[in-house]
Image (cartoon, rainbow, N blue to C red):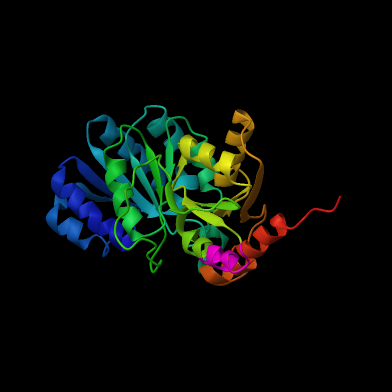
């Protein structure tokens, strides 16, 4: 996904001379093509994320379209005050890109996990939160974000994520992508966990479960129209995310259902309210945290099982 992001950024910058890239001492080789074509529009801000974010806000308020890029926990938690005050308070159109979000850097331990970032950023006024699933969605999300008049957090994976879409889908921030239809269960996914959700759907088909899959790449603003359709036609909604159960995508859906008084049953799947202390890459972490395709399918079957009187 990061390679697709870098390639698309070059194309966006070629079309719009206002596009500026700020990086937090990362991705220098990744952005070789950008630097070669636009040497005066790349700034390595070093390990000084707070300064980088304030700089981006100033550039945006001056009429430019800055993109801020570094590892997800460092571009969110480390400079949260600057995002809140400099970017959001001024409604500055800054595109904040967190790479390796969720458990993308699971092998590097809790310092590199970002399992609370959706919660932290979606609560900020004027901030949109977008979590593409693959390289195709990443390209489309970046283009859409650079045309938006507001700050956007773009939460992407690292590298090697499988392609979900054969070609670039019809992507618009705020509009969910239906992938499969079903009336028993709707699996609602956000971000790079989507391939596991689709694999879980395949397993559920074998149990004669009529299951739909919808990708909510945008956590804020939620696609309320799509949610309403799903909540009124499906027996069970299941949200799946590589993020804490507290404050993330599942929480946003639960809040919407409570406020609207719509929907029957909701099951939320995400990471627990605890640090993950084990060593291992993304797939190992997902397995241990109950986010593998097998675990997702098992949880759905458990929820569908007849309840004892």
| Residue at the limit of the structure toward the right, as seen here | 309
Q: Which residue is rendered at x = 62% and y = 38% of the image?
A: 263
For residue 132, side relative to residue 28 (left or right): right
Residue 197: percent from left, percent from top: 52, 61
For this rendering, which residue is in front, 144 or 185? 185
For this rendering, which residue is in front, 96 or 82? 96
Q: Is residue 290 visible?
A: no
Residue 305: percent from left, percent from top: 74, 58
What is the quadrant of residue 56 in the picture?
Answer: top left
Q: Where is 287 relative to 118, above or below?
A: below
Query: What is the span of residues highlighted in magenta in the rendered image?
Result: 199-208
| Residue 204 painted magenta | yes
Residue 46: percent from left, percent from top: 34, 53
| Residue at the limit of the structure toward the top, as seen here | 90
Of the 4 image quadrants, the one containing the N terminus is bottom left
Q: Main secondary structure of the magenta part?
A: helix
């Amino acid at each position: 996904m990061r390679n697709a992001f870098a390639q698309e950024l070059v194309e966006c910058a070629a079309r719009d001379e206002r596009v500026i890239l700020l990086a937090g001492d990362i991705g220098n080789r990744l952005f070789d093509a950008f630097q070669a074509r636009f040497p005066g529009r790349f700034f390595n801000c070093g390990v000084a994320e707070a300064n980088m974010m304030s700089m981006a806000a100033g550039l945006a308020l001056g009429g430019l379209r800055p993109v801020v890029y570094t590892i997800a926990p460092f571009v969110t938690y480390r400079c949260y005050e600057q995002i809140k005050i400099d970017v959001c308070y001024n409604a500055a159109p800054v595109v904040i890109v967190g790479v390796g979000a969720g458990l993308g850097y699971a092998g590097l331990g809790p310092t590199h996990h970002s399992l609370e970032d959706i919660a932290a950023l979606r609560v900020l006024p004027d901030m949109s939160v977008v979590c593409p699933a693959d390289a195709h969605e990443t390209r489309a999300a970046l283009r859409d974000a650079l045309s938006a008049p507001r700050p956007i957090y773009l939460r992407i994976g690292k590298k090697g994520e499988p392609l979900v879409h054969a070609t670039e889908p019809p992507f618009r921030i705020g509009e969910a992508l239906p992938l499969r239809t079903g009336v028993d269960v709707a699996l609602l996914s956000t971000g790079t966990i989507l391939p596991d959700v689709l694999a879980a759907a395949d397993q559920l088909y074998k149990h004669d479960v009529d299951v739909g899959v919808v990708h909510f790449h945008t956590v804020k603003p939620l696609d309320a129209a799509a949610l309403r359709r799903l909540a009124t036609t499906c027996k069970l909604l299941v949200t799946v995310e590589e993020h804490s159960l507290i404050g993330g995508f599942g929480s946003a859906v639960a809040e919407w259902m409570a406020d609207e008084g719509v929907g029957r049953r909701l099951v939320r799947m995400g990471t627990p309210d605890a640090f993950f202390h084990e060593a291992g890459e993304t797939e190992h972490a997902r397995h241990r945290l109950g986010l593998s395709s097998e675990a997702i399918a098992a949880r759905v079957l458990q929820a569908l099982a007849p309840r004892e009187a």
